[in-house]
Structure formats: C-alpha cells, structure tokens
C-alpha cells in the first residue's frame, strides 16, 4: 500500500515523516503519473492559492478528481481542506478548488498568522482522548452537505474536521503534532480502499 502526499508546496515533508513512522510507504507526488498505484492521497497545508494553481498547472487536478470520484481516499489538511471544498466563502480570489467535498469553507477564518493557536479536540473517529490540533491561518467549515459527517468541532461549535465517504478534511495540521492517530485513521482508510 502506497500513500501519496502532494508535494507542490506546503507541509508535505511532515506528512511523509508521520506516515513512515506508521510503516506506510509514503511518496511525494508532483506529476500525474506519480498518482498511479496509490491507495490514498494527502493534500497538505500551505498556501491555498498556490496549491490550487499548481494542481491545475501541472495537470494534477483532473486525475486527482477522477481518483477521488472512484473512491480513492483523499485527505486535505488546512489548505488541502480548501482544495477539496465544493464552495468557498469570503475572499476567494485566485482559488479554483477541486469541488469534491460537499462543504463550504471560509479561508483564514481565524485571522492572520499571529492568531494561530492550538486546541484539544474531541474527535468522533479517534480513540484515546482529545487530539492536539494546531491551527495556522486555518479555514473552517461553514456548511456541510447531507452526507458529510462532522468529526470534530471547537467548543464554540465551529466545524474543523469532516468526512464524506472517502474524503477527509481537517482545518488543522495533524502532521505538526506528535500524535499520529489522524494519520493512522487515514492509513486505515487507504487500506480499506479497493481500486
């Protein structure tokens, strides 16, 4: 089983390292042909305008959409969540998403870099207590479609982790925590995938 991490920009190395600590074969993805034989793909955090432009520029958008629509697990963290969203609210200039997940997302919802924070979250899909979530210029989910499961919310009710079938999205950066449970959860999704 091989899991790809989109390596165009952003926190891809941290995801690769976390996956490898779990024994998963993790590969950097920069070209469409590198998507072959993957059991899952992570779209990391970074700068959403840049990542979305590069997805289309390097011809990755269509094959990623096709694979996701055919059931391959795809996980978007922070900017990756923005990439997966069907709709964006607020300032969306320069961002063309993959329109895969039935969520409406607001970019930079918590403010600027200096407004970054950490929070302990109760996550429905994870055992072992609260999860340490790192939010850096994070988006939030404003609205979900009927088939989207909310996995975690902040204490004020803000949705920050969601799943829709084979699609997973988190507002925060699990790869920046020492806690590997979210990655373990995604590895299991990839193991369950039958192309």
Image (cartoon, rainbow, N blue to C red):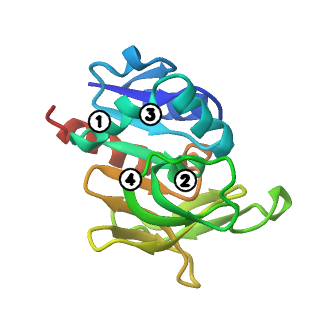
Q: In which quarter of the image is the C terminus?
A: top left
Q: In which quarter of the image is the N terminus?
A: top left
Spatial CA span between label 2 and label 1: 18 Å
Viewer-side label of 2, 4:
2
Is any part of residue 28 visible from this angle? yes
Spatial CA span between label 3 and label 2: 14 Å
Which residue position holds label 4?
168
N-terminal label among 2 and 4: 2
Viewer-side label of 3, 2:
3
**Figure check: 104 above or below 65:** below
Which residue position holds label 2?
82
- Residue sitting farthest toward the bottom: 156
Q: Residue at x 67, y 68 (%)?
A: 90
Q: Do the residues labelled 3 and 4 touch (CB within 8 Å)?
A: no
Q: Are marks 3 and 2 in contact (CB under 8 Å)?
A: no
Q: Is mark 2 on a helix, strand or loop?
A: helix
N-terminal label among 1 and 3: 3
**Figure check: 157 above or below 46:** below
Which class describes the residues within 10 Å of circle 4: few (<14), some (14-19), or many (20+)? many
Q: Is mark 4 on a helix, strand or loop?
A: strand
Total marks shown come to 4
Spatial CA span between label 2 and label 4: 12 Å
Q: Are marks 2 and 1 in contact (CB under 8 Å)?
A: no
N-terminal label among 3 and 4: 3
N-terminal label among 2 and 1: 1
The numbered dot on residue 66 is 1
Is any part of residue 179 visible from this angle? no
Q: What element carries label 3?
A: helix
Residue situated in front as seen by the camera: 135 or 10: 10
Which residue position holds label 3?
61
Spatial CA span between label 3 and label 4: 17 Å
């Amino acid at each position: 089983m091989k899991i790809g991490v989109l390596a165009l920009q952003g926190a891809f190395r941290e995801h690769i390292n976390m996956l490898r600590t779990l024994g998963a074969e993790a590969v950097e993805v920069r070209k469409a042909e590198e998507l072959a034989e993957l059991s899952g793909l992570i779209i990391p955090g970074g700068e959403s305008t840049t990542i979305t432009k590069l997805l289309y520029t390097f011809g990755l958008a269509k094959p990623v959409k096709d694979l996701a629509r055919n059931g391959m697990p795809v996980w978007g963290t922070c900017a990756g969540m923005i990439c997966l969203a069907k709709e964006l609210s607020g300032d969306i200039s320069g961002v063309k998403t993959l329109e895969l997940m039935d969520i409406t997302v607001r970019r930079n919802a918590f403010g600027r870099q200096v407004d970054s924070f950490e929070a302990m979250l109760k996550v429905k899909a994870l055992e072992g207590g609260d999860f340490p979530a790192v939010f850096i210029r994070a988006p939030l989910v404003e609205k979900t479609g009927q088939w989207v499961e909310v996995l975690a919310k902040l204490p004020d009710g803000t949705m920050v982790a969601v799943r829709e079938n084979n699609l997973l999205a988190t507002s925060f950066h699990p790869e920046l925590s020492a806690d590997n449970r979210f990655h373990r959860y995604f590895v299991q999704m990839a193991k369950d995938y039958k192309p």
